[in-house]
Image (spheres, rainbow, N blue to C red):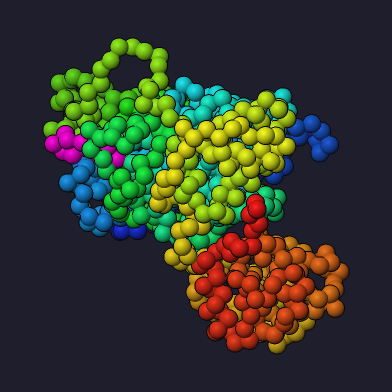
Amino acid sequence: MLGLGQATCPFAEPAALYKRQDSQSLSHLDAYKVDDSTGYLTSDVGGPIQDQISLKAGVRGPTLLEDFMFRQKIQRFDHERVPERAVHARGAGAHGTFTSYADWSNITAASFLNATGKTTPVFVRFSTVAGSRGSADTARDVHGFATRFYTDEGNFDIVGNNIPVFFIQDAIQFPDLIHAVKPRPDSEIPQAATAHDSAWDFFSQQPSTMHTLFWAMSGHGIPRSYRHMDGFGVHTFRFVKDDGSSKFIKWHFKTRQGKASLVWEEAQIISGKNADFHRQDLWDAIESGNGPEWDVCVQIIDEAKALAFGFDLLDPTKIIPEEYAPLTKLGVLKLDRNPTNYFAETEQAMFQPGHIVRGIDFSEDPLLQGRLFSYLDTQLNRNGGPNFEQLPINMPRVPIHNNNRDGAGQTFIHTNKYPYTPNTLNNGYPLQANQQHGRGFFTTPGRIVSGSLVREVSSTFDDHWTQPRLFYNSLTPVEQQFLINAIRFESSLLRSEQVKKNVLTQLNRVSHDVAVRVASALGLNAPAADDKYYHNNKTAGVSILGSGPLPTIKTLRVGVLATTKSSAALDQVGKLRDRLKRDGLMVTVVAETLSKGVDQTYSTADATAFDGVVVVDAAEGLFTGTETSPLFPRGRPTEILRDAYRFGKPVGVLGKSEKVFESADVPAEGEGVYKEEAMEKFVEGFEKGLAIFKFTDRFALDS
Ligand code: HDE
């Protein structure tokens, strides 16, 4: 039971809780955990009670106001929800660690980066932006990637996204962007989707959105999992050394699982079949001991080069191509522990870009500057008071000493009778910390800001079309096709002809090819090509399909389509399962009923749940139609195989059966189609296919 004031109170004895070097023991949340495995039920104030039957005037009479057990239970229930996040409401989080690869004090005074092998506990929350808390994980969207480092000099948050740029350049436009993207005010339709008039009206009137929009319409908008996406700090920040010298940096979190995304139809089906797809994936990967990892990297740039690359480093709609500034790997982020309680940890995690530590500083990016106000403000709204930093998930692992006092929900019992500075009566404590004393945070001394007051956008922020084109040029032809298909999908749902035309005008400034191909689907003509906008440059690191096979297939999901008709065949399936599991794959055996060794029935299984599908030849009759069953819809096994193939996944038959492929219209000789009688040989080929992940020759290109 929680007992502030007990010896285990985390802010009284923080060091003791951080002895071992894994996130399990680094958790300062343990002191707050409530163990209900023994004892009697009590009221909120500790008295043992029973709470199953209300107090009534006679067995058939009305409930009495006197019934404090009833009132407390119902009242606590009535107040269970706090307002969901205004954006990024749907998400999932996990605990882990960051381990520094080196002593980076040559570039920053940040203490969590000042020793080789130094480990810092972290909590990460992934999210989508537009959908409400109960929406589906695989909606097409930008994805949040918010990381809290519980450093030994206080909490540091990188509240980033999986897309390295943002829609707007000035925070004052954020409410406009979100009002345009969220569902219509009258009908509250559509949920978690930008496929509606107001979103594209805004996009086409505000061309700074083009770059992020292109990323979101590509595979980056529909990642295979949170684990298969990169993360970015988006804004330019500063690294500051102890001596006050500074450089600009950009944060990049590079997935060690490899980048992978779904195809749109898969994402749509998953939204219905398993709305918790990403949440489940993260949970299962961590439970299986294969938690995800990212290399935490920075691009480091001299501040004098702020305008040297043809765009402004303060403009959050621009990437710094890796060719201009390589990535320096600082350390590794690993997630290895699921939350104990979703509400207490994930829902109550209150990230803020303003949670910053010595050695790191902001830049003058006007979007970042606005966020520094917004996140604190929104937390006050969600919590109804200023003490939300005292919630366990938000508590730093270091003691807190200041003269902030009182407020709703205060949990500290301050003993200092002189809560002001300067004082003599408390011997001047708590002391002021700064660059020279107490390793305090300090603003970069060299930051020079001057200018007359203006409401203007810098002309260095004016170019909105060069970088979306750079992005588009850097994709493979299949990725370009997917992107065009996504824009076709969304823009064909628009009702307003004017908005459609405005969209084509903007697309045409990025690429005449894109405009023409989208226009063809809308039954409209694209504007004439305008060469002044176009170039043929490319950059590395932005393509997903072009980034080669996945570095690991661990935790990918394989569906084994089997039959309960033959026990010998089920034995073979068991061996296949064990073999695949040995390589870290998650195997689901599908058959007619849940007999021993079967995980799922054909009536619930779907191709979208698997990264690859194997049929065992004993199940042939279920595919060719010679055997049917009332236990699942007719043709279901074949449909699973056909869909897996259509969605670009590796598929195979273990044993002899050309007829299985035939039944599903799968060319037996195709790329990513495997058939072997010997298990070892089969597994070898099939696993290579899993690493390739998507066989792109199966997708139609515009001729
Ligand atoms: Fe956010 N954003 N944002 N945002 N954002 C919120 O804060 C906001 C922006 C991001 O898992 C809110 O705690 C403004 C960029 C993430 O808890 C809110 C602007 C980037 C999360 C808010 C931006 C982000 C949020 C809603 C324009 C990537 C979820 C609840 C200036 C670098 C964090 C909350 C979590 C959440 C405001 C733009 C990322 C309303 C005003 C750019 C990952 O305060």
Judged left or right of residue 157, residue 166 is: right
Q: Can you name the residue that lies furthest to the top here?
A: 453
Q: Position of residue 351 (x, y in %)?
A: 42, 37
Q: In the image, residue 549 lies at what x, y percent?
A: 47, 65
Verify whether residue 245 appears in magenta: yes
Determine which quarter of the picture holds residue 466.
top left
Magenta residue span? 238-249
Residues 291 and 642: in front is 642
Tell me if residue 196 can be seen: no
Residue placed at 40% from the left, 14% from the top?
455
Give the residue at x 26% y 40%.
301
Q: Nearer the viewer, residue 90 or 418?
A: 90
Asked if residue 241 lies in the magenta stretch, the reply is yes
Residue 252 visible here? yes
Picture coordinates of residue 162, whole percent (x, y):
47, 45
- Tell me if 206 is positioned left or right of 318 in this view: right
| Res 100 quadrant in image | bottom left
Query: How many discs appear?
Result: 0
The relative height of residue 614 versus residue 656 in the rendered view (above or below) is above
- Counting from the top left corner in percent of width and height, residue 702 is at 65, 51
Residue at screen point 56% across, 25% down: 205
Report the residue at 33% width, 48% height from top: 323
Left or right relative to 451: residue 209: right
State the residue in front, 77 or 670. Answer: 670
Q: Is residue 86 above or below residue 100?
A: above
Image vertical order of residue 203 relative to residue 265, above or below = above
